[in-house]
Amino acid sequence: MTSMRVSGRGGAAPKVAPYAFVAPAVVLFLLVFALPIAYTVYLSLFRTEVKGLGLGLGNRTEVFVGLDNYWRALTDSELGAGALRVFGYGAILVPTMLGLALVFALLLDEERVRARGFSRIAIFLPYAIPGVIASLLWGFLYLPGTSPFNQMLRELSLPEVNLLSPTGIYFALANIAVWGGVGYNMVVLYTALRSIPRDLYEAARIDGCTPLQIALRIKIPLLAPALVLTSLFSIIATLQVFAEPTTLAPLTNSLSLTWTPLMKVYQDAFGRGDIYSAAATSVLIALVMFVISFGLLRITRSRAFGGER
Amino acid sequence: MRLDIAKKAVAVGLGLTLLAACGGGTEQAADGPVELSFWAWAPNIDKVVDKWNASHPDTKVVFSKQAQGDDLVTKLLTSAKGGNPPDLAQVEYQALPTLVSNDVLADISEGAASAKDKFAPGIWDQVTLGGSGVYAVPQDSGPMMFYYRADLFEQYGLKVPTTWDQYAQTARDLRAKASDKFLGTFSSNDPGWFAGLVQQAGGSWWSVEGDTWTVSVDDAATKKVAQYWSGLIAEGAVDKTPMYTPEWNKALNDGTQIGWLSAVWAPGVLQGNAESTLGKWAMAPMPQWDASAPRTGNWGGSTTAVTAGSKKQKAATEFAVWLNTDPTAVEALVTESAIYPAAISAQEAQAKPPAFFPNQPDFYTQAAKIAATSSGFTWGPNVNVTYTAYKNAMGEAISGGADLVPALTKMQTATVDDMKANGFTVGG
């Protein structure tokens, strides 16, 4: 901006120009991002209060309660339990999804591989299916009564598997996310792999490296920035998990309507009609994500991006 | 200062969003007929609305199809907060106190109080909330009944249970004769179903004295019902998977579930979910706790309500009363929407059985007798909280193989805590 002003010979119009250029972005940012956040913080400091039986007009008033909603959210055992469940789910999901994405990316990067274009599309395709639809489809496959897998097991007189049991549900949910997420992460990693100069591999080969050694000692270390990025995105997506458990909940006794923190926010806001405590919980979740994201970047920055100055 | 600007900007922003979302549906032409917006989900109710529009050129009702039950409550609350609710909406009985308490519904006693005599007193109490106001006009009711596969009952030599003891024994006998079949299921996903069973057992979850609410979701009658089903689940006599899942539909279709404790509207559901079983089902009164004093509860049933935000409440009230008491309207509701009307005169007038029950010509005569044994029930101002707690606590108890009675304590605590947090006076 400074350089523009200098080159603009100092008149009134050139001083306005840069502001006019950034105005649409700033206005949109303020309207759809900053304002809702500010309004959420504002709401989180209030609560409604009912007088008497509450049956009749004008019985509800909005009262200022300071940080009371935050204190309630922090001491709510269901929110803590939900956070723990999400960590358990993430512990299964993130390593599996990124591990598979990395393996597929490395395989596709091999020179001898055939039908590369087709495989890439085929692995990526599930990402195009919306989470709710995928969950409905998987729901059919999981329900013991309608599952073709269980039917096969029954015919072979093998014990049946119920993925909708209290423990199985973690794997059932992680599976939906793995199925949908591997392709996306693979494309990110694969693109990063393609940008590594090929002569590095040639040099390694001349030094006697096997393809496996090239993958482990050259490709993966050079992929580190992309791996950090995909992990960060995956962790954020994990913390925000909502559509899959919400869609599966009516099918099973194992999923409560407050199974994840975001489901609890939804229940508070729209089930209980208490947008105030929902706002407080949202702010807390955002803070946790902020801390995790920046913490992870801080820890890994020196290592992963060390060579990128 | 800053906060004020922010507030105004937010208000403008929200206003714009709402305007965009609603497309100005409630705007009215400067001259011409009064236009009323109506949100409902009953199947084919638009055809009944058409009849009104044909005979009332001065008042045009614009119908808009909505999602059922809880989702519409959420949408009504949100639209009322946004200041742009529809003029009329279909509301279930248990949602009335919640909506009244949130200032969403108008008191229409002036235009609707005279309709009182057209309904059974128990039903009318539900729309007055025990006070002098009238917050909706009853549309249909859902007295609970027992549905069973007559052909399979005969095949396995089972008799229709008339008491809960017999129901338990029938469930066991069936398991002994066909280990892959169930007489029914306990659904952690259907709090309205459980509430109906509790009403039958004489439970009372909310009551009012002066300005004080009393909450007893874990009262003796409710405990009795929970204990009964705990026992059946523990011995494996009934299924424990939720209703309304693809698995349950399949089980109704292929005869894995040979019975269903449901309500008068069940034929429509069976027709949709288990089409291949046409003519194989039969209906009987609910199994009883005390066979000498038969009772039943209600599962579902809804009303037509006018919103407090409506600028045309008088015209809207006229439509609500017409829709649910006018003989042609109610007849159309029965034939087009297949509901069980709340208006007494219409209940008696139904001669033909539901299309899915050609084998039971006296279906509605029996239904009217059963409906007369419905027990009253007072709904609280936060039924949605209790219902969510039911789904969570019952689901957890069943999947953990535990007793259902402690889940009632969780429902009670969740309900009372929420009411206290909102500033209600809760005694007892």
Image (cartoon, rainbow, N blue to C red):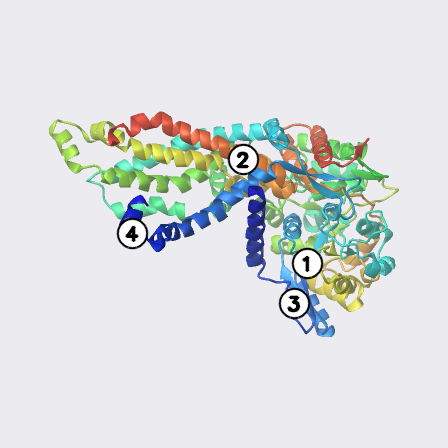
Q: Is residue A302 above or below residue B262?
A: above
Q: Name the quadrant containing residue B59.
A: bottom right
Question: Which residue in the protein does label 2 denote?
Answer: A283
Horizontally, is B336 left or right of B13 in the view? Answer: right
Q: Which residue: 58% across, 47% down? A: B250
**Residue B248 can be seen, yes or no:** yes
Contact (CB < 8 A) between labels 4 and 1?
no
Q: Chain of mark 4?
A: A
Question: Which residue in the protein does label 1 denote?
Answer: B356
Contact (CB < 8 A) between labels 2 and 4?
no
Q: Secondary structure at mark 4?
A: loop
Q: Secondary structure at mark 3?
A: loop
Question: Which residue in the protein does label 4 denote?
Answer: A8
Q: Residue B384: give x, y in percent of width and height.
A: 68, 42
Q: Chain of mark 1?
A: B
The reply to whether label 2 and label 4 mark residues of one chain is yes
Give the label on residue B222, or none.
none
Horizontally, is A180 left or right of B253 in the view? Answer: left
Give the label on residue B28, or none.
3
Q: Secondary structure at mark 1?
A: loop
